[in-house]
Image (cartoon, grey):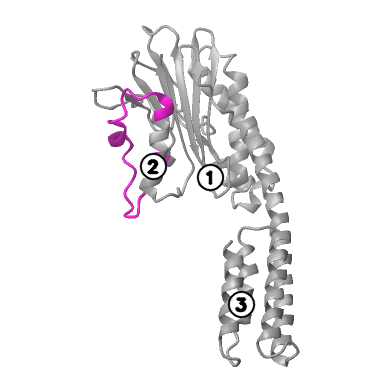
Amino acid sequence: MIPLGFIVLISVVDLASPTDVHLGPLLVVAPAITASFGGPWFTGLIGALAVTAQVVIGIFHGGLFTTNHETQIIALILVSTLIVLYCRVRERRGRELTRVRSVSETVQRVLLRPLPDRLGPLRLAALYLPAEDEALLGGDLYAATRVPGATRVLIGDVRGKGLTAIEDAAQVLGAFRELAHHHTGLPGLAAALDAGFARHLAETAGNATGSADGNAGGDDAVERFVTVLLADLPDDPVEPVRIANCGHPPPLLLAEGKAVRTLEAVHSAPPIGLGTLPGAHYRQEAYDVHSGETLLLYTDGVTEARDGERAFYPLAERAADWGGVEPSALVDRLRRDLLAHVGGRLKDDAAAVAIERA
């Protein structure tokens, strides 16, 4: 109704104005506005109505075949035609973008599968916020699987961005899903992930995969690594949770009415991809996690997110109010609070996984 209203308003005012006042050129506003929300056919219809209105103005306001009115009609036809062509191009690009997003969603579901709401005796929820516009997958990763008597969880963060980071994330996720069932202990699993990642780097060392995003193989391969946190959560609530931290931010333990507890690693271990460094050893540590407590795993994209004054996001402080909140509601609160802190846009990918024993 807005473009039609413009056509009627401009026509009436023009006809009521003196003959030396010409408002007809303003009719181009109608098809221009229509292009912002309508398709080429509807925009073309509004353009035709605008041209018709210009003809009516010419007939009743000084003569249709004057040089001025003929020029205005021809110009309006040309501009309306260009707007319709623009709509066709925009519509085609929109269809292409829809197909690309569909492929991206498929890739995301294959690589970064959604976590189930329940896995064994646990309730889970995950959060993933990519930094790139329109991106659905980046360098942050998480996965969970059932092993005998426990649920095994991984969260990680690939160094770098772009296609190389996605490629490295895909390798780690695929290796975890396969190797998680072949190692009873987390140190052995971490060592196997490191060995597999080393083979992956050797195979991609000569590729130019990263040339488009500034993170190519070759010499830069020595700087490619993944910080990873592995956790085994036994089905028996009496048994402790075992965690192997490979250069990753420590998880938080939340409980209603209690202070947030940071599960710091006593023995540091290198990220996946740096396991061959001298003195590098992968270890696991045990922590008591009781029923009703929530384990919050996250990547540094959460804690290193900055607001307009360059202040880091205070995750532990904010999480103090989230004890006793179920995982799905907790990650929803984290999403809204984190985006509000950064003003709606992150500079780095961010991921988090909340786990609670039912």
Please state if 242 lies on the left or on the right of 38 as rendered: left
Q: Residues within 10 Å of mark 3 (few under 14, many from 20)?
A: many
Which is in the foreground here, disc 1 or disc 2? 2
SS class of the residue under badge 2? helix
Q: Residues within 10 Å of mark 2 (few under 14, many from 20)?
A: many
Q: Residues within 10 Å of mark 1 (few under 14, many from 20)?
A: many
Q: Which residue is mark 2?
A: 338
Asked if residue 252 is among those painted magenta in the image, a careful observer would answer: no
User: Residue 23's x, y, as percent?
Assistant: 59, 83
SS class of the residue under badge 3? helix
Three-letter amino acid code at the position of disc 2: Leu
Label 3 and label 2: CA atoms lie apart by: 51 Å
Three-letter amino acid code at the position of disc 1: Gly
Q: Residue at x 71, y 80 (%)?
A: 55
Q: Main secondary structure of the magenta part?
A: loop
Asked if the residue under mark 2 is in contact with the one under mark 1, i.e. CB atoms within 8 Å, the reply is: no
Asked if the residue under mark 1 is in contact with the one under mark 3, i.e. CB atoms within 8 Å, the reply is: no
Which is in the foreground here, disc 3 or disc 2? 3
Q: Residue at x 42, y 34 (%)?
A: 332
Does residue 1 sit above or below 19 in this rendering?
Answer: above
Asked if residue 318 is among those painted magenta in the image, a careful observer would answer: yes
Stretch in magenta: 302-329
Viewer-side residue, 157 vs 68: 68
Does residue 218 sit above or below 106 in this rendering?
Answer: below
